[in-house]
Image (cartoon, rainbow, N blue to C red):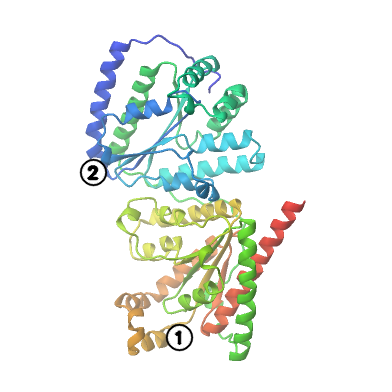
């Protein structure tokens, strides 16, 4: 791709200026079309240091209403954000429907630089390429338009520009050690950029522009953006077809096969609770020191005891090292983005714990049954969720998923108690009673969810909760065992 790219063709600057003005006018008019169609657009500008990425973005946004776009530089990350998964800053930067995000460098620069610095292994580099393809496919299937541009200059041109920047007092700060290193390793970078673009060409194609011809690059980038938006508005919001990738699955029973009779006596419960919570406190300290992230996911029937279960897990944890996320109906900014966005932005930093009270599985339960998304959307979500959770475990996270299970009679008894107890009445709503009438439909959906997303890297655990105390002890035992294993594995890795 880069090796075969022809550069330094002559420019007719007068003609180009006229074309740029016309394209800017067209782009300005497309803003309302984007809003009307509800189309989000992501423009990724990659390229060589000193190729003019910032100047190109400046030209692209020059005539756009600033309320319709956002410019993000994911390379300039605070230390805290480097403690998240590879794709975190790019998911975080997703625009709302009808708006545009411009990325000044992104997932290619991130992956290639870390690989050439030997900060990640070759296997991790290949994993990141797979994750990029999954990320881009999820965006396309969710209705996003993505434009990917690589701004190319020769090694000689780069040297000249870096020298000019370094010699001027007002711009010398812009030349970094990474820029100098990239120039020195120009050939290696060319090979890896080529490899990366070839491997990530399938969903959204790359467009290489000649950065040595500034006006031509601006004209071509504007034309590409205008054409992409025009085609997107004409075609309407894309909705990808469901498909299923091969994941290593773990066997799990159907809900009707689960024996809900297990219970625990009061004395054993108190002893086990104290023992397990003490051990969890110790493990939390180890997790923090070793920077192992933990994600605990709670789903279950209304009144199954999720809240009480979460309280017993959270109590022994250092409050500075965990967050509980109660997930309700998405807010307008969340509805206007990819459905996974609100979960990506709530992920824990390394060494921290995130507890989700309801999760991304709402896509294949509530949203499915209440008609809040199309059948294609929820059918496609099983695979997207498995990919999401694989990205988390590839990052090093411990992911544990609990379905808190009760029978219908137990639920009715708890609903009735809540309704008849003044201090508990806030816990029961008309929606709870409506959902109860759909028990059979929800059971079908839950069974399908469990069967299709119980992967070996992120398994489901069905927690029998007719006896809430038994459920709490079982959950704590599963968590403690998983965290002990994670700490042991991490210790082996750093000592091998």
Q: Name the residue located 43 percent from the left edge and 48 percent from the top edge.
A: 92
Which residue is farthest front? 169
Looking at the image, which residue is at 40% across and 9% down? 10
Residue 33 coordinates in the image, percent (x, y): 24, 39
Residues at badges 2 and 1 in contact (C-beta under 8 Å)?
no
Residue 19 horizontal/vertical position (percent): 28, 18
Judging depth in this view, the residue of 324 and 333 nearest the camera is 324
Residue 322: which disc? none
**Towards the viewer: 300 or 20:** 20
**In the image, farthest residue toward the right:** 496
Indicate the quadrant where residue 112 lies: top right
Determine whether 352 is above or below 473 in the image: above
Of pointers 2 and 1, the one earlier in the residue sequence: 2
Question: How much space separates mark 2 and mark 1, taking CA atoms?
Answer: 48 Å
Residue 218 percent across, percent down from the top left: 36, 22
Q: Splitting the image into 4 quarters, where does residue 262 fall?
A: bottom right
Residue 84 showing in the rendered view: yes
Secondary structure under tag 1 reads helix
Q: Which residue is mark 1?
A: 410
Residue 81, given in percent of the width and then of the height, sits at 50, 48
């Amino acid at each position: 791709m880069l090796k075969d790219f022809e550069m330094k063709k002559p420019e007719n600057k007068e003609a180009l200026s006229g074309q740029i003005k016309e394209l800017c006018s067209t782009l300005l008019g497309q803003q309302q079309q984007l809003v009307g169609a509800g189309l989000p657009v992501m423009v990724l500008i990659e390229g060589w240091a000193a190729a003019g990425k910032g100047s190109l973005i400046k030209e692209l946004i020059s005539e756009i209403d600033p309320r319709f776009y956002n410019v993000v530089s994911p390379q300039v990350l605070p230390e805290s954000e480097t403690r998240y998964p590879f794709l975190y800053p790019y998911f975080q930067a997703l625009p709302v429907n009808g708006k545009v995000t411009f990325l000044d460098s992104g997932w290619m620069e991130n992956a290639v630089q870390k690989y050439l610095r030997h900060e990640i292994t070759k296997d991790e580099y290949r994993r990141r390429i797979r994750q990029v393809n999954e990320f881009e496919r999820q965006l396309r299937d969710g209705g996003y338009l993505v434009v990917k541009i690589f701004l190319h200059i020769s090694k000689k041109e780069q040297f000249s520009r870096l020298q000019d920047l370094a010699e001027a007092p007002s711009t010398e700060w812009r030349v970094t050690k990474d820029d100098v290193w990239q120039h020195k390793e120009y050939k290696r970078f060319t090979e890896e950029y080529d490899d990366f673009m070839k491997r990530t060409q399938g969903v959204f194609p790359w467009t290489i522009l000649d950065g040595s011809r500034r006006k031509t690059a601006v004209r071509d980038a504007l034309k590409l953006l205008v054409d992409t938006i025009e085609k997107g508005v004409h075609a309407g919001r894309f909705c990808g077809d469901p498909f299923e990738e091969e994941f290593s699955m773990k066997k799990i029973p159907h809900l009707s096969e689960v024996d809900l009779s297990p219970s625990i006596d009061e004395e054993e419960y108190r002893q086990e609770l104290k023992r397990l919570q003490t051990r969890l406190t110790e493990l939390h300290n180890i997790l923090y020191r070793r920077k192992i992230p933990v994600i605990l996911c709670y789903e279950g029937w209304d009144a199954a005891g999720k809240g009480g279960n979460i309280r017993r897990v959270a109590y022994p944890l250092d409050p500075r090292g965990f967050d509980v996320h109660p997930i309700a109906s998405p807010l307008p900014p969340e509805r206007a983005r990819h459905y996974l966005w609100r979960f990506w932005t709530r992920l824990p930093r390394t060494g921290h714990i995130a507890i989700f009270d309801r999760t991304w599985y709402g896509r294949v339960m509530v949203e499915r049954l209440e008609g809040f998304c199309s059948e294609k959307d929820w059918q496609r979500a099983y695979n997207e969720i498995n990919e999401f959770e694989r990205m988390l475990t590839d990052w090093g996270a411990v992911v544990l998923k609990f379905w808190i299970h009760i029978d219908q009679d137990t639920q009715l008894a708890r609903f009735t108690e809540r309704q008849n107890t003044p201090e508990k009445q806030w816990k029961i709503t008309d929606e709870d009673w409506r959902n109860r009438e759909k028990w059979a439909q929800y059971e079908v959906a839950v069974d399908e969810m469990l069967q299709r997303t119980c992967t070996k890297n992120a398994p489901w655990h069905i927690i029998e909760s007719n006896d809430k105390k038994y459920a709490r002890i079982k959950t704590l035992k599963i968590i403690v065992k998983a965290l002990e294993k994670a700490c042991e594995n991490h210790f082996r890795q750093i000592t091998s």
